[in-house]
Image: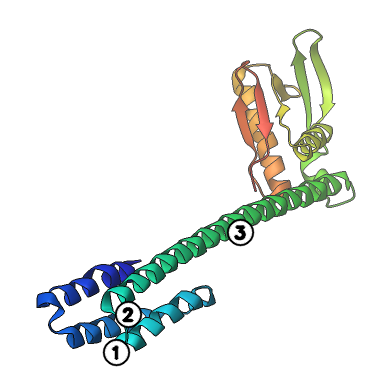
Amino acid sequence: NLFFSFLTASTCTAIMTSDELRDESTAKRNLSRAVSAVIDEQVSSAVVGSMKTLDDCITSLTHGNGDVDQALTKIQESVDRLIDQQDKQNTDQNKKHTDMVKLLSKQNTLIAKQHKHQILTWAIDHLSQKGPGSFYEQNLQYLKYKKCDKYAGPISDQQGDELIKKILYAFLRGNGFYINNCVFLGESTNDANKKFFRARIVNIIRDLTMYDPIVRKESNGLYAIYFPDV
């Protein structure tokens, strides 16, 4: 709106500083040039009506028709309308921009969910293939572990591939999965072996999905594994 300020302040000053409008023709020419510059810069159809009023005032002043004060009043009214129209256009444009940002955010969220679903369903299917050279044969066929349950005591000879499936299905539902107090079969149940077990599960899931899952110690003191945002 800088040019509006120029029109209402500088132009009027150029006219009124003449002693009692003694040099009225010069004032008219200054006003004509200033307002014409404003008109030339306008391209929006929403302001055509107000610009037509300005143009009429300029024509009248240039040819010496009409009173200068009356013309200035009309010009001021037209400029005020132009400012209001410009403010409305800016508000509409800002709303459109905000709506577009929200729409793109929703689309990106949906795309991310679809991508995550595709990754995990492929991983589960790939994990189920147990033929020669399969991921199962190379990484999980002999992967067994035991879980020291708080109530039932040690539960031995658990299949590693079944644990990975349970974890992947939890990821599909948007959840994490506890992997606490687990060690590989034949190892003692100490903190170092538990940490090694968690690291091995992370590596297997990363090899399957190409994403590093996150292991986090929860407020209850138990360790849980989560799939990262994609």
Dot 3, crowdedness within 10 Å: few (<14), some or many (≥20)? Answer: few
Distance from the alpha carbon under mark 3 to that under mark 2? 36 Å
Residue name at image x 38 percent, y 69 percent = 79
Bin the neighbour count of mark 2 within 10 Å (Cα to Cα): few under 14, some 14-19, many 20 and up: many
Quadrant in which residue 75 is drawn: bottom left
Amino acid of disc 1: Thr
Q: Which residue is mark 3?
A: 100
Of helix, strand and loop, which one carries label 3?
helix
Q: Of marks 3 and 1, which one's residue comes earlier in the chain? A: 1
Q: Is residue 197 visible?
A: no
Tag of residue 36: none
How was this image coloured?
Answer: rainbow
What's the residue type where badge 2 is placed? Answer: Val
Residue extending farthest front: 66
Q: Is residue 56 visible?
A: yes
Q: Residue 171 in the image: x percent, y percent?
A: 75, 38
Q: Which mark, residue 35? A: 2
Where residue 49 sits in the image (x, y, percent)? 50, 76
Q: Secondary structure at mark 2?
A: helix
Q: CA distance from mark 1 to mark 2?
A: 12 Å
- The amino acid on which the numbered mark 3 sits, given as a three-letter code, is Met
